[in-house]
Amino acid sequence: MNGGALIVGAGQAGIQVAASMRDYGYDGPITLVGAEAQPPYQRPPLSKEFLAGTADLASLHLRTPGFYAERGIDVVTADRIVRLQLSPAGPPGAGTALTERGRRLVFDRLALTVGARPRRLPLPGADLDGVCYLRVLDDATRLRAHLARARDVVVIGGGFIGLEAAAVARSHGRNVTVVEAGERLISRSVAPVISEFYRQAHARRGVDIRLGATVAAIVGEQGRVTGVRLTDALLPADLVVVGVGVVPRTELAEQLGLECDGGIVVDEFARTSEPAVVAAGDCTVLPNPLTGQGRLRLESMPNAVGQARVAAATLVGKPRPYTDVPWFWSDQYDLKLQIAGVTDGYDQIVVRGDPGTEKFAVRYYRQGRLLAVNAVNSAPDYLAVRKTLASPVPAAG
Amino acid sequence: MPKVIFVALGGARRTIDAAVGDSVMATAVRNGVPGIVGECGGNLSCATCHVYVHEDFLPLVGSPADLEDDMLDLAVSDRRPTSRLACQITVTEALEGLTVECPEAQP
Ligand SMILES: Cc1cc2nc3c(=O)[nH]c(=O)nc-3n(C[C@H](O)[C@H](O)[C@H](O)COP(=O)(O)OP(=O)(O)OC[C@H]3O[C@@H](n4cnc5c(N)ncnc54)[C@H](O)[C@@H]3O)c2cc1C
Ligand code: FES
């Protein structure tokens, strides 16, 4: 490769930067380098249909091989960028890269779409056989194999991924316990009424939910997990799923001296503190797309895609700000949760419908202004709020 | 492999060899058919996979289920009797030659 665009990380964001650059008319070389062995695939099904066995590997692929060939996108898999350097003399954003396998790449435009890694548990026993994380396809394949043989499953972490994995395991008839350190489930993203709804919904389906529970150790015999020791109980387990959040990858950005603050800091044009270099997806912290204020992490597929489009526009010299309404979904059993907007800083909620019917929605407001919705099996509520948030708000007095 | 034909707004046709079991949305997105976005990956959350099914195929394809019906009602700009969300149509041998038209805009 000589010149052209280098995109580091071949996940949802990376592939979208490449595809959108072509859509916007860029005709130089594009190289997409990904550390994983598989061509770019979708992650959301890993804790849903793929884990449940209703979707296969082929259905996860984001694009066909023909797509990359037709558009002249060079996809390098199973190699990792280990070193990045911007040339002090060259045009802004130009530089060189070195891969783990010793490939040297020269680029004149750079996008970082390196995503995030799962937070590891710093606990005794965390490396026993049968302790699984869930981020990449290899994790999901291993977890699926363990799940087929498991009897007692303990999920550590009551966030979306943990709860989705718990739902699949329970639907397969396993004994499932969810251990959450906080006082409620999914506490980072939703109001207490939603947390409580999911606690009850899982309990009704036979999952044992332990809130405010501290894991002291994971225990095993002959290298295999046999249980999870809480400070006040021992839970038997032949499978442990750890879902305690992710940590954005910032090492390469730090090599380049880019500003990082729990993620690579970008502005509404997906520009890093070196404005010629863009970043998108789970590796970034960005201003709230609806207000332009603050710094958020939006770990979601729609954000990876939307922000990547903006990054591509910036790279081809047609910048436009990122104003997409953030949205997200989670599938657990027959419960579809759809979220639109950002709940940060809400001071009031309104519950519409009855959580007891498993069909209701919660709207979030701040000083009377609509911020967000969480809709459970209520697509119309979700859509209505998403539409409202997408229409430009009249400027305040 | 059954063929699926995508008709763009200007009338341009693109024929794709689809895999049985894939959705029509996934078939379009993986092959880069313009006009079908499929933003939520087939999760019935975005309606950016709206298509008009050619009348000959309507009886085979069937009508939308409740949630899809809600999405079509609320999210798409120009709903017609032939409107469907492409992520909810699964490719089968029986659908050989399925022809769908892309709308003017996706939400
Ligand atoms: C199990 C699971 C379920 C999810 N469910 C949902 C859901 O229901 N809805 C939703 O909206 N979102 C969901 N998400 C989140 C969503 O998948 C992510 O937000 C999205 O995939 C982020 O894409 P990304 O491209 O930014 O990062 P990633 O997908 O993490 O991709 C980054 C890629 O870069 C590669 N990479 C990193 N460093 C280097 C390097 N130096 N050189 C080369 N390659 C490198 C990594 O190997 C990785 O493949 C889920 C995630 C998981 C794990
Ligand atoms: S792909 Fe989102 S609704 Fe069909």
Image: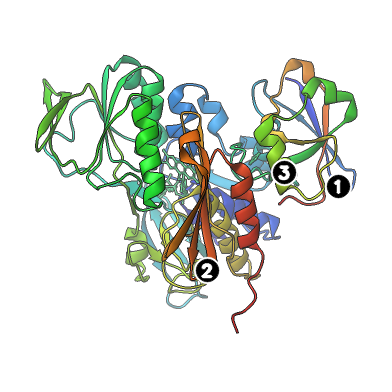
**Do we see residue B76 in this rendering?**
yes
Q: Which residue is denoted by mark 1 in the rendering? A: B9
Residue A132 to residue A349: above or below = above
For disc 1, the chain is B
Q: Which circle marks residue B36 in the picture? A: 3
Q: Which residue is denoted by mark 2 in the rendering? A: A368
Residue at 52%, 68% in the rendered image: A368
Residue B88 point in image, percent of width and height: 68, 31
For disc 3, the chain is B
Q: As shown in the figure, which amino acid type bears the numbered disc 3?
A: Ile
Q: Which circle marks residue A7 in the picture? A: none
Q: Are marks 3 and 2 in contact (CB under 8 Å)?
A: no
Circle 2 Cα neighbour tier, 10 Å, few/some/many (<14 / 14–19 / ≥20) = few
Residue A214 point in image, percent of width and height: 16, 42
A192 to the left or right of A177? right
For disc 2, the chain is A
Residue at 25%, 41% in the rendered image: A180
